[in-house]
Amino acid sequence: MTDATTQMADRRPTRRRRRRAGTAHIVVFLAPALLIYTIFSIYPLVESLRLSLFDGLDDGSAVWTGLGNYARLLFDSNWSVRFWNALWNNLILFFIHMVVQNPLGLLLAALLSLAPRFGGAYRTLIFVPTLLSVVIVGFVWELILSPLWGVAEGMLSAVGLGFLYAPWLGLEDSALTAVSLISVWQYVGIPMMLIYAALLSIPDELLDAARVDGLSGWWIFWKVKLPLILPTLGIVAILTYIGNFTSAFDLIYSIQGVLGPPDYSTDIMGTLMFRTFFGQQTQIGDIYMGATVASMMFFVILVGVTIYLVGVQRRLTRYEM
Amino acid sequence: MTDTPDTSRSRRGRSKSWGTAATVHAVLLGYTIIALFPVIVVILNSFKNRRGIFTEPLALPGPETFSLEGYSTVLSEGSFLLYYGNSLIVTVVSLFLILLLGAMAAHALSEYRFRLNGILSVYMILGIMVPIRLGTVAILQLMVQLDLVNTLVSLIFVYTAQGLPIAVFILTEFMRTLSRDIKDCARVDGLSEYRIFFEVVLPLVRPVLATVAVFSMIPIWNDLWFPLILASSDATKTVTLGVQQFIGQYTVNWSAVLASLSIAILPVLVLYAIFSRQLISGITSGAVKG
């Protein structure tokens, strides 16, 4: 994927493509993909944005409210407290992934790129959690960390650290961190693989040249390899950012349920959107506010992607291989 | 590490690299254990009775603790075979459509020059950045109108739409690097544009198709969101949703919970053991060749 983007960047405008008579085959090739993609992906997205500008009346009809729903979400304390809390939790989730998952992925990839014995076996086994369903991962960790079963507590006690144990998933202060680390555990295989592939694609001549210049392994990594794989690290960062708004829901829904307990400390945009849309216990489902929450997620993702495209990727293209 | 009085240059060099190798292995092995430990604990305990699970969670199942009670509960109470079938149908059909339709679109965008080419390329790629889940509200309304709620077809459409952008992106980039001469030769031989695609281009992009398949497959198989919203009926549950709901009902029956988790994990592990070589090389080579 890394090189795919770099190739896109240096696509030559002089590429010659032959104009051919008849366009029927072009339509046949394009139409099925365009249709399915438009009907089930783009149209629902646009429709959600449109719905967010309406409000429902008791008789089931919709009335235009302009940005009224957004104003409620951002400023009406019935909504804004939950919204800002969820957005903040999403950002914390992202932050923990950036400081734990991606450096860990980089470390593992760097070690694997030294081509140690059994490297293939390590790579294969470390990727196992990534393949498992988030639901399964969530339950597995819930059991392991459960005070009822006591596996985590027993293991800490075995090394004399039993006093450190707490039911992390159930405590307000630690629940979000615990959920984030479970997610890191599951997904670290992806940055590891992407970075590993990028490290492998560095030409040997470059590394040989660095070695001839007398650079040690450590310096070669910092001064030669790391700058060359920066575009991949950028892609990993933006994938992490987008993933926080999608796949994180599955994990929190499985472990904690739709309310983001305890006391909304693990409530994120995904759970908020689900609750708003479908309702729960005392709250009635509201498709218009649900669409508004989804649209806010859309704008938040858009901000991140824009920062990435304008700020990060532009600057990185200088280092392309 | 193994310092001996003998400190000749070569010897010292060797012991230093030995130390490096040991560190590398210590870290990788350590993390491998962390990655596998929770999975192994769950699978081991699924073969124990209730007492065995609680008294010695880390012990292997012994003659006194071995039991299949969890599995018998799961097999009699849950319809996991059906859920597996549903997941399999949804994943395989979606993958087939993503690969076929994605390759066709990528071929059109990379091979032919026409007015809307640039716009359509960007349009198709938008979906990589914008998660399809954000349109859930409207997707559900649409499925209600099309009378597709609680059908596997609804999931197949959504997953195909979800997988197409990345497939088109990767395949277009790769197809642009294919030599034109082969295709032009085929044209001179009088092959139709359709036969050129199926008989010349598709075989050439097979390795990239494998990469795309890997990238697209995992999120489809593991998804909870859309099965929960679009197809939560008993007949259409996927295995991910089935396990999630089964465990919700049986929280107190630990052996059943552990057994259902194991039933969900084991087939994935078996398939992975068989295909891991292709899968891993698909991910890495795809990323390298792009």
Image (cartoon, coloured by chain):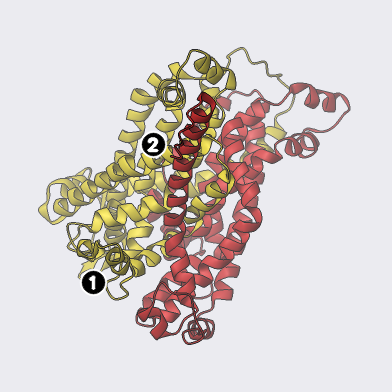
Q: Against B188, is B104 above or below?
A: below
Which chain contains the residue that carries disc 2?
A
Of residues A153 and B11, the one drawn nearer to the viewer in this rendering:
B11
Q: Residue at x 32, y 40 (%)?
A: A98
For disc 2, the neighbor class at 10 Å (few under 14, some 14 to 19, many from 20) is: many
Residue B134 screen position, x and y as percent: 37, 49
Tell me the tag on residue A238: 2
Q: Position of residue A86 (x, y in %)?
A: 23, 51
| B55 over A141 or under it: above or below | below
Say which colour chain B has.
red
Q: Hey, which quadrant is residue B93 in on the image? A: bottom right
Decide if residue A191 is in sight here: no
From this viewpoint, is residue B207 visible?
Answer: yes
| Outermost residue toward the right in this view | B189
Q: Measuring 38% from the left and 77% from the top, which residue is drawn there?
A: B56
Name the residue at 25% across, 63% down.
A160
Q: Is residue B267 left or right of residue B254?
A: right
